[in-house]
Image (cartoon, rainbow, N blue to C red):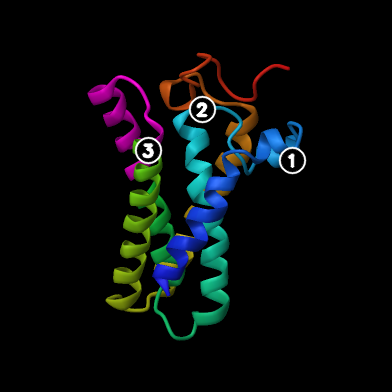
Amino acid sequence: MESIGVVFIIVPGTCLHFVFEWSDHSKFVAVFGAVNESTWEHLKLAFWPALVWAVVEYLYFRLALPNPGFAKAFSVLTMMLVIITGAWGIDVVLGQHVLVVDVSLFVAAIVAGQWISFRLMLHSTPLPRRDLFGFAVLLLLAIAFAIFTFFPPEISLFQDPVTSSYGIPEQ
């Protein structure tokens, strides 16, 4: 099931890179799609589809799999960690972003996250507190993406490397 999740996350995640512009800069869409080229905004491309996939899996398999909330939270955090470290590594090694490398990094992050999710659900003892913790982490991340879209901290994670600006570009 997690291999289907890889495709489910990659396809809409790729579209989320462009949806803000396609929506004529809708503030609502800004929460879900990348509003600039910062690493933080690229994390949305993995987070939102992974969250939807987590809900789908939870609705269909919650009784059969232990700790789906915990597994999915850890999966999303893995994806984010791979994207952040990979993006910064690309900056250090290449000094610039190359589309094929960026796309490969995105795919690798999704595969890593889904693999972690699979392993945790396969080899995990059911613990309701662990699951609640996972759902809380996912909720906090969703809130953070919404808030930081409009009020990004002025640190490198949130800085658009193309324009050196933060958050939604001025129109």
Residue at x 51% of width, y 62% of height: 8
Question: Could you tell me residue 145's position as x and y percent?
Answer: 57, 40
Instruction: Say if 139 sits above or below 117 in the image.
Output: above
Residue of label 3: 100
Badge 1 amino acid: Phe
Badge 3 amino acid: Val
How much space separates mark 3 and mark 2, taking CA atoms?
Answer: 15 Å
Q: Secondary structure at mark 2?
A: loop
Location of the C terminus (image quadrant): top right
Nearer to the camera, 33 or 51: 33
The answer to whether residue 34 is left or right of residue 9 is: right
Considering every residue shown, the one lying at the far top of the view is 164
The answer to whether residue 107 is left or right of residue 165 is: left
Question: Could you tell me residue 69's position as x and y percent?
Answer: 46, 66
> Which quadrant of the view contains residue 4?
bottom left
Check if residue 110 falls in the magenta segment: no
How much space separates mark 1 and mark 3, taking CA atoms?
Answer: 29 Å
Q: Can you tell which mark lies on residue 28?
A: 1
Q: Can you tell which mark lies on residue 37?
A: 2
Q: Can you tell which mark lies on residue 58?
A: none
Query: Mark 1 or mark 3: which comes first in sequence?
Result: 1
